[in-house]
Amino acid sequence: MQFLTHNASARLPTQYGDFDLHVFHDNRTNVEHIALTCGDIMRSPQPLVRVHSECLTGDVFASTRCDCGEQLHHAQQLIQEHGHGLVLYLKNHEGRGIGLSNKMRAYALQDQGLDTVEANEALGLPVDGRSYEAAAEMLAFFEINTVRLLTNNSAKRSALETLGITVHQQVPLLTQPTAENLKYLQTKSAKLGHIIPDLMG
Ligand SMILES: Nc1nc2c(ncn2[C@@H]2O[C@H](COP(=O)(O)OP(=O)(O)OP(=O)(O)O)[C@@H](O)[C@H]2O)c(=O)[nH]1
Ligand SMILES: [Zn+2]
């Protein structure tokens, strides 16, 4: 691996079933990324893979402003049902790459009427500053080249393909819209190329 070092692994039983948690240190950014694996992934021809961007508010605090926490847990559930797969949890992706402080600044602007894209732009920040090299490197560590990708985001699929990953299938990861996150989901569908059938005009 070019930039990642595999640091440690251990069994992680969860509400959804048993995973193994692998910690990788990113030498460029000094953060630790996580691969949560289920089953014999190296023998699975097209494992189900969730490449998940860290969202402290949604993943940890059950925020209803976004659908991240629900997507993460649904992905864990689907992977367990499937019998093998991985969640790659990218720790430098908070706020689509702008970090937690800037995401909170963007939330404050959204409370004044801006949408999720306009808020980043008003702050002079990229709408989506994420890169997926760490995900590609973790897949390479497990000798995985072809995946079934759990995402609604076609740009995420293209980014992984550019890094040499074959996306055999894009598997939707839909959640039920709520009053709090409806505008956020609509903006992703209208402006960010997310495929969310119920919200497409
Ligand atoms: N800048 C910004 N980031 C947000 C906002 N809401 C959620 N995020 C971040 O967005 C990231 C998730 O990206 P999304 O656009 O929701 O979804 P995605 O990962 O591109 O697509 P899926 O694979 O379909 O989930 C996480 O890192 C969140 O912290 C917001 O309003 N503004
Ligand atoms: Zn979120």
Image (spheres, rainbow, N blue to C red):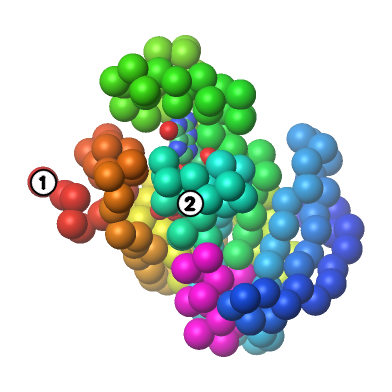
Q: What residue range appears in magenta? A: 73-86
- Magenta residue check for 77: yes
Quarter of image, res 193: top left
Identity of the residue furthest to the right in this view: 7
Q: State whether residue 118 appears in this view.
A: no
Tell me residue 149's x, y (percent): 46, 65
Tell me residue 122's x, y (percent): 40, 13
What secondary structure is marked by label 2? helix
Above or below — where is 149 with respect to 79? above
**Residue at (33% x, 41% y) in the render:** 180
Above or below — where is 193 with respect to 46? above
**Please, what is the dominant secondary structure of the magenta stretch?**
helix
**Residue at (40% x, 18% y) in the render:** 109
Mark 1, mark 2: which one is toward the viewer? Answer: 2
Dot 2 corresponds to which residue?
A: 68
Total count of labels = 2
Amino acid type of the residue tagged 1 in the rendering: Gly
